[in-house]
Amino acid sequence: MMRHRMSVVFALSILVVFNTSGASARRNTPPKVAILHHAASDATSVASATGCKALSVRVVSYGIDARLDADKKAIEATETLTYHNLTGQPLQTFPFHLYLNAFQPQSTFMSEVRQSGTRGTGSEAGWDPKHYGAIEVQSLAADGVGDLTPQMQFIQPDDHNPDDHTVFQVTLPKPVPPNADITFRMTFHDQLPEVVERTGYKRDFFMVAQWFPKVGVWWHGAWNCHQFHATTEFFADFGVFDVKVTVPRNYVLGAAGDEIGSDDNPDGTRTVTYHAEDTHDFSWTASPEFTDVEDSWTGTAGPVKIHLLMSPGHLGLKGRYLQSLKGTLDYFDRWYGAYPYDRITVVDPPRGALNAGGMEYPTLITGGAAWWEPPGLRLTEVVTEHEFGHQYWYGMVATNEFEEAWLDEGINSYVEVKIMAALYGQGRSLIDLWGATADDEGEQRLSYLSTPDADPLTRFAFQFMSSAAYGDTTYGKTAAVLLTLEGIIGEETLRNALHTYFERTKFTHPTGTDFLKAVGDASGQDLSWYFNQAVSGTNVLDYEVLGIRSDRADWYRKNPPPGKKGQTLYRDTVLVHRKGDFLFPTETDIRFDDGETVREKWDGRDRWVRYTYLKRAKVISAEVDPDHKVRLDRDFFNNSQTAVAHPGATRKLEVYAVFVTQLFFQLLAWLV
Ligand SMILES: [Zn+2]
């Protein structure tokens, strides 16, 4: 997900100041029986009837038949879920997510929004009935068991709020034995909200996401099925989806599966059938106003069909969407691993529906654009890059976003910095317009600086100090932590570590321990000293040059001769201070007026270090972290001192750049 759009926007405008101063065989055509002939490393198929190896352990198999009522903004559906009990033990109770029930005034989600806001809503926003959303399971039965509707019961494992109806559970009369299957059959009704928090409708545009009863994940010996929170995203098992969607015939559809059939019905509707394998969610979108821009890209695993569903007035931006998407596909393919699916759909939300934008689902992402966006203001590009990146970390690696959001959003933010710089240029990857430049690295850093010490990266997503702390830490701080890690193990080693991590853990729901082990293995180093502070700690990193001084060695003489460059002897001292509680090895460059530069190294453990020289030269300047590798350093301005101050930096240019940037972001805020 793209976070806090407007605060990022504001941050970008400030940033300019800093900046100016400083899978093998694939199917190429959708067959009726879809098969992926993938040689996955350790995944075994339990669902593939063909005997071909699947990419993932397919725990779930969903069959959904959904009919959209475009006037009532509602969906009537039936759902069949076959759950394969691979837990190694009997299971009698099954929890299900009902995400749409978050959009109700007494839900936990909304009370958390009220406390500290969330992506698209400030904490002071009142309740707006048009944002009401609901999902009602009208009936539930299981094969061989019969009707279970009376057994359904809402549970609140996280906060015991009895008014929160985002999770229900059902208890069977007898357990499902290990390695056996159970098939649930449901009918359910969705009332969609006007777009809010990634889902809903706007006029006749529909973004249908988190819309069906979804079973929890048996993980580490227990059910993992958290309530829907203002700052949480999702976690689900891999499997197979067979979904039929019925919409008015004039609607253009997009969905997270291969289209394998389309039938026109006598009542003026159309039913389209989709199939998806080795994914853990299924979302779809519909609008009579979409233009479906079709394209393709070919990577090491074969061709990928691209559907770009453009909203009215935005067609002029299709080239920018496609350039960013294909460029991102290229870099992921080259750096981290092959994209194994044969499709990717990008949804361009219409005017007024940006709250449905900037979001990821398996093989379907939502972007964000405004018709007036000038080239050089790369909002469309960065959102596309970011959401596609989730196909790897959220889509395939599939970590638990409720509990370890940094492994998805954070790693994705770091990769976003790298790919945006590779595609659009270091230092100007976000804004390169009328002489104003800003880059993504700086934007992530500003986010980190907003809340540098409230929470460790490892906090459960719904337990951060605030919504802002969640975002600043999960996205910005993780990016800064990984950028700083580049300075310790090297950029290429970190890239290899991410590649190792992806290949080793894809489709397996790994944890932070697995990620840190991959980094340790790739680097051959014990990095626990760093991770304990940067990942599981809240330590703040800040080193400063506290003072520089050149004192004549003959200071005691009554009438010393005038100082002569190269001849007079000085006692030069430089004092470096650790302001924060983050211990980090530092380098300091000390420049003298005879042209010499000395690089000093310090383990950074004590509170301060003083460097003393007896030299026929004066100190000109001292700078901590001269190669600018320590992106976690909270304050760059105290990293250096010069013997002679240089007041009156070129403020005019900075002010102009800020003006340009703010003007555009203000326009964006009004128009989207
Ligand atoms: Zn994201």
Image (spheres, rainbow, N blue to C red):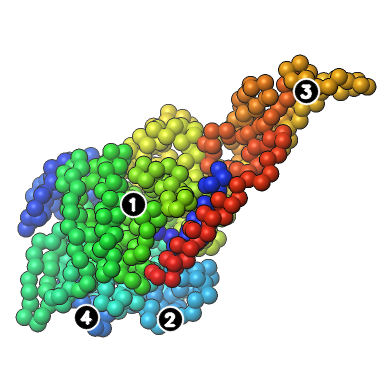
**Between marks 4 and 3, how big is the CA–CA gap?**
83 Å
- Is any part of residue 479 visible from this angle? no
- Is any part of residue 36 visible from this angle? yes
- Residue 604: percent from left, percent from top: 63, 33
**Which is more N-terminal, label 4 or label 2?**
4
**Which is more N-terminal, label 1 or label 2?**
2
**Between marks 2 and 1, how big is the CA–CA gap?**
32 Å
Q: How busy is the neighbourhood of tag 2: few (under 14 within 10 Å), some, or many (20 plus)? A: few
Q: Which of 320 and 33 is in front in this view?
A: 320
Residue drawn at x 6%, y 58% as measured from the top left: 32
**Between marks 2 and 3, how big is the CA–CA gap?**
70 Å
Residue type for callout 2: Asp
Q: In the picture provided, is 459 more to the left or to the right than 129?
A: right
Residue 638 placement: quadrant: top right
Question: According to the image, label 4 marks what residue?
Answer: 69
- Residue 260: percent from left, percent from top: 10, 61
**Which is more N-terminal, label 3 or label 4?**
4
Question: According to the image, label 1 marks what residue?
Answer: 385
Q: Do the residues labelled 1 and 4 touch (CB within 8 Å)?
A: no
Q: How busy is the neighbourhood of tag 4: few (under 14 within 10 Å), some, or many (20 plus)? A: some
**Between marks 2 and 4, how big is the CA–CA gap?**
22 Å
Q: Do the residues labelled 3 and 1 touch (CB within 8 Å)?
A: no
Residue type for callout 1: Glu
Of circles 2 and 3, the one toward us is 3
- Residue 491: percent from left, percent from top: 42, 34
Question: According to the image, label 2 marks what residue?
Answer: 128
Question: According to the image, label 3 marks what residue?
Answer: 571
Q: Looking at the picture, does residue 534 appear above or below residue 138?
A: above
Residue type for callout 3: Arg
- Residue 556: percent from left, percent from top: 90, 22
